[in-house]
Image (tube, rainbow, N blue to C red):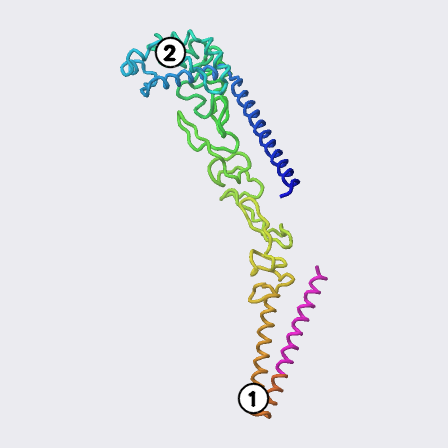
Amino acid sequence: MTLFTVIIGYQIMVVLLFSSFTASERDLALGKDSDKQLTTLKLPPCQACKMVVESFIKGMERTARNHFGGGDTAWEEKNLGSYATSEVRLVEIQEHLCEDDRARDQCLTLAEAWEQHLEDWWLGDRKENSDLTQYLCVDRVKHCCASGHFGPTCQPCPGFPDNICNNNGKCKGNGTRKGDGKCNCDVGYTGQFCDSCDTNYYISYKDEKKLLCSKCHTACEGPCTQAGVKGCLACTEGWTMDSERGCLDVNECFASTAPCKRNEFCVNNEGSYSCLACDPSCEGCSGDGPDMCDECANGFLLKDNMCIDSSGDVSYSDTTRYLTYLGLCVATCIIFHNSPVLASGVGLCVALYVTASEYMLGTLQNNNFLSTVLKYFKS
């Protein structure tokens, strides 16, 4: 190994190591930026309050020593003794609040601001109200509303409590101090209270408490009265109206003007059609495969109503023909050894057969050539 080779190898190793360190530093920087974005993320007031509550509940689970009672104070006191409601446990919970990366800065700020509320609930109020979300977010800091209410004063949503927006939509601002309480209807429903079917939908079920809207058939242009093509009041493109059966599919493939190009065939679909390429052996076709050709393409011959590769067929025919000729010649030679006179007659017959065969084959090939030329000039 020469000195020059050692130097080059050392330089390559240094470059690779430098590239590796650079990539690692870049990935680390990107990871830090991502972490910073998560921790500095700022959530809406109600969502932020619920985040603090969720973190506090996780602290209760963590300090329950595998005996978390889901916030049931009586159960916890029974199973955890005095530790269940002790300040020691509260301190342990508060020390690990907001450890999740998501909006951690905002969570810590709010937890510090609401420390007294959390202590009041922990040391006494939770016996009367075990729901920390209701206690803190709704009743104390007033960042949220109870479910089914909206706005600054927590007004009830339309249809509260059992039929909000007819159960076919969502109340804007539900559960928060935001929103106007208007119904944001699900797909297929419309109206101030989501109590009507939208365009292209029909009533499939209705009683005093429930409305069910279903989508019209794809053949319908605009509204419909029932399921299927019979329910259409008008038909979309690709369909035609029948007074008894409703919208019927138009078969574009039977149109007077062919919808597809020369080397394509038409396939009818509901309300439309598709053009698919003919088999490579075809020059025009009515369907898929070499047996559906209008004519055979160049290099293909019609055999048994199917266009086949002429090169392979000719090669096979040539081999068979020459083997036949060879067999006749061998037979003539054998006869010649026994009877030269008879062999002369047989040889003459063989010569005439070969000449006639080659003449007929040449005529057919010339005819194929002429037909190809004529087809070319016609196109």
Give above or below for 158 relative to 9. above
Is the residue marked by circle 1 packed among few (<14), some (14-19), or many (20+) residues within 10 Å? some
Give above or below for 135 relative to 313. above
Question: Toward which corner of the image does residue 37 lie, by quadrant?
Answer: top right
Whether pointer 2 and pointer 1 mark residues with C-beta atoms closer than 8 Å, the reply is no
Q: Position of residue 10 (x, y in %)?
A: 62, 36
Report the mark closest to the observer, 2 or 1: 2
* Residue pointed to by mark 2: 90
Q: Which residue type does callout 2 highlight?
A: Leu
Q: Position of residue 178 (x, y in %)?
A: 50, 15
Q: Which residue type does callout 1 highlight?
A: Ile
User: What range of the chain is rendered magenta?
Assistant: 352-379
Reply yes or no: does residue 368 show up in magenta: yes
Reply yes or no: does residue 324 show up in magenta: no
Q: In the picture provided, is 71 more to the left or to the right than 317?
A: left
Q: In the picture provided, is 144 more to the left or to the right than 64?
A: right
Q: CA distance from mark 2 to mark 1?
A: 120 Å
